[in-house]
Image (spheres, coloured by chain):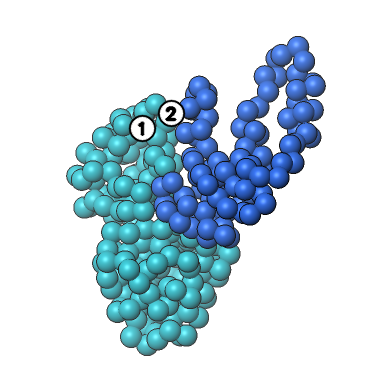
Chain colours: A cyan, B blue
Amino acid sequence: MHDLSPLTPLGNAEPSIESIGEVTLEEVTDVALASVAARLGREDDTRLALATLIEVDAPAPSRHAGSTIRAFWTGPDQWMVEAPLETHEDLAKMLSNEIGSAASITEQTDAWCRFDLVGNDLFRALELLCPADTADWSGGEVQRCSIEHLGCFVLCRDPSTVSILGPRSAAGSLHHALVTACHAAF
Amino acid sequence: MIINHPILGPRDAAEFVYKGDASLINRPDWQADDAAERFHEYGYLRDNSAGLHRELWFHEQGDRSWLVVTRDTTTHEITKVELARDVARAEGRSR
């Protein structure tokens, strides 16, 4: 029997957390992810099933919503679902059982790394990184955009918390970009 | 240049990738008797018009939707932006 220890996307035993000026940059590893893409002609069925799961309407374009299970919009009739890893490690399987053949569900947990920026005036760092109008964000917004050369999702949880999801295989590069921007801005 | 995305609003053209003439969404029937000739036209022959031109753009650094953009090749003015899937469905296609 192998005795393997999981590593975070940055390659450490524990998620990194660091303070840069007045903001905190933390690696988040306790969230399960799965993508939901409605099949042709089953868009309304998918939207209804997703609404039941997240207990609010399926998010409109560029929005995220939910409670324990959350979803954010990734494209026309497509969403990414987030849930606590501790209780929902089999998120894709659970979604598949609930949504059935109305949508294509894909496990995404280990495909992404996530960094949360916590602090005030986060747009000062974000405006150096991506073309989103983050200064106007107040909570609930999401946008896919390029940070350096990486396709990332930027989510505004509340005015002082922003999550950045990027490709796990480039976690080090994304982390470097975030640290550099934070040092420049704060 | 700004492309007014039908779902996401005005976005910088740098977020998009140009994918060619919009007629490319009308792929010929490979089982037709004249399929070889039709695919030759589909693959190689383009109108090079001065004026309004319908073209495909892919929102590569955004939501990855495909758009049909109507642009004037003499002024770069964009007069219409539609989701490519809406265009295809309006023409009676299933996807």
Q: Identify which residue, B20 or A24, lies in the foreground.
A: B20
- Amino acid found under the numbered disc labelled 1: Glu
Q: Is residue A16 visible?
A: no
Residue B37 in picture, x, y percent from top left: 80, 21
Q: Is residue A51 left or right of residue B33?
A: left
Q: Nearer the viewer, residue B10 or B49?
A: B49
> Residue at (68%, 23%) from the top-left corner?
B28
Q: Which residue is mark 2?
A: A40
Drawn side of residue B71 relative to residue A136, left or right: right
Q: Secondary structure at mark 2?
A: loop
At 51% from the left edge and 33% from the top edge, which residue is drawn?
Answer: B87
In the rendered image, residues at marks 2 and 1 fall on the same chain: yes
Is residue B43 placed above or below A54 in the rendered structure? above
- Rendered-image quadrant of the C terminus of chain A: bottom left
Camera-side residue: B89 or A158? B89
Q: Is residue A12 above or below residue A105?
A: below
Q: Position of residue B55 (x, y in %)?
A: 62, 42
Residue B43 place in picture, x, y as percent: 76, 33
Quadrant of residue A164 in the image?
bottom left
Residue type beneath disc 2:
Leu
Number of callouts: 2
The subunit carrying tag 1 is: A
**Looking at the image, which residue is at 66% across and 39% down?**
B21
Q: Crowdedness of circle 1 by 10 Å Cα count: few (<14), some, many (20+)?
A: some
Measured in 3D between alpha carbons, the distance from the residue under mark 2 to the one under mark 1, in whole angstroms, is: 7 Å
The part of the image, by quadrant, that contains residue A118 is: bottom left
Residue A57 drawn at (x, y percent): 23, 43
In the rendered view, would you say B55 is above or below A147?
A: above
Which residue is the site of mark 1?
A: A43
- Residue A122 visible in the current orientation: yes
**Image point (35%, 72%), residue name:** A135
Q: Disc 2 sits on a residue from what chain?
A: A
